[in-house]
Amino acid sequence: MMSDSQAILLLGPTASGKTALALRLAEEIPSEIISIDSALVYRHMDIGTAKPTKEEMAAVPHHLIDIIEPTESYSAADFAQDCVRLVEEIRNRGKVPLIVGGTMLYAKAVREGLSPLPATDPAVREKIGVELSEKGLPALYERLKEVDPKTADRLAPADTQRITRALEVFEMTGKPISELTAQKGEPLLNLSSYALLPPDRAVLHARIAERFELMIKNGFLEEVKNLMAMPGMHADLPSMRSVGYRQAWNYLSGLTTFDAFKEAGIAATRQLAKRQMTWMRSMQNTQLLNPDEKDASLAVLKKEAEQILSGLKIKF
């Protein structure tokens, strides 16, 4: 039986075992992995992102890992463009594309299409930046309440990045970002979507704490020290807003104690996992898998991968 799907999308919260499951599938089915993770795109950020090991990446071709410097940015639109291209290339090699990770905004981009948001305009960004420096974030938040109350209600008053971006979009288009993001595009890929949903949150929380402790033991703070020393690095870069890195930066800057850093890092990771699981539960046309039932989950994915592979072979 053939499948109409072009690729498999495997999502899961942090520390749910999605990478290990994808690697097991890749051992049995000719495939390549496309990372759907906004932190793995950065070079020099290995420990805190739980990046696949060199051995794992050598065993199965991986894509969209280590593609930009931590001083650079990479948007959902960038991901969508790269992902569509890679899916075609992998299929042309007679393999099954496995899109694996946990950045839900990227998943939304390829599953539902992109909202018609304008690209960043450096002049407008600079203008908003000057306003931020002169008037402060509370004044910008009040202005956002006036021009886009829906977005203001959704954002925390201290969310500098999203508040300034919403004002940038309004400056460039004259329309609230909430109105523009409500306009859906067309799906960019036909995907078979699966989500690993841990049944026991307490077990996931324990796994997250254990993994964070292991990252520290493996040199995470040294990694962040090296990043801080790189030219052009500062705490407000998108790369340094990744979970764990912001907390480590604050600790290494003398703003918190070691215990407070560790507690904040674990709490932020748990909050991320909660947001990821909430999003996954709301996704339509997505089969939920139990990460604790590894063999059963593998069997489901393998069956779909075989059907995609069958379609590729008939095509050739």
Image: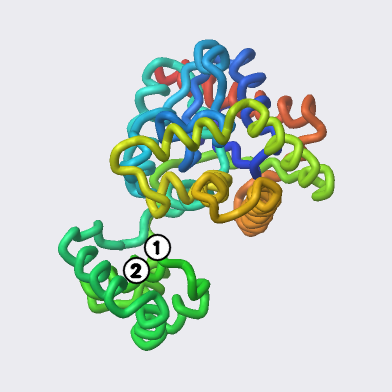
- Is any atom of residue 148 visible in this view? no
Residue 43 against residue 160 in the figure, above or below: above
Q: CA distance from mark 2 to mark 1?
A: 6 Å
Where, quadrant-wise, is the C terminus in this rendering?
top left
Q: Which residue is mark 1?
A: 161
Residue 161 in the figure: left or right of residue 289? left
* Structural crowding at the residue carrying mark 2, measured as other residues with C-alpha within 10 Å and reported as few (<14), some (14–19) or many (≥20): many
Q: Quadrant of residue 164?
A: bottom left
Labels 2 & 1 near each other (Cβ < 8 A):
yes
Q: Quadrant of residue 118?
A: bottom left
What is the x, y in percent for residue 69? 34, 35
Q: Quadrant of residue 282?
A: bottom right
Q: Amino acid at mark 1?
A: Gln
Where, quadrant-wise, is the N terminus in this rendering?
top right
Q: Amino acid at mark 2?
A: Thr
> Residue drawn 37% across and 48% down?
234
Residue 19 against residue 280 in the figure, above or below: above
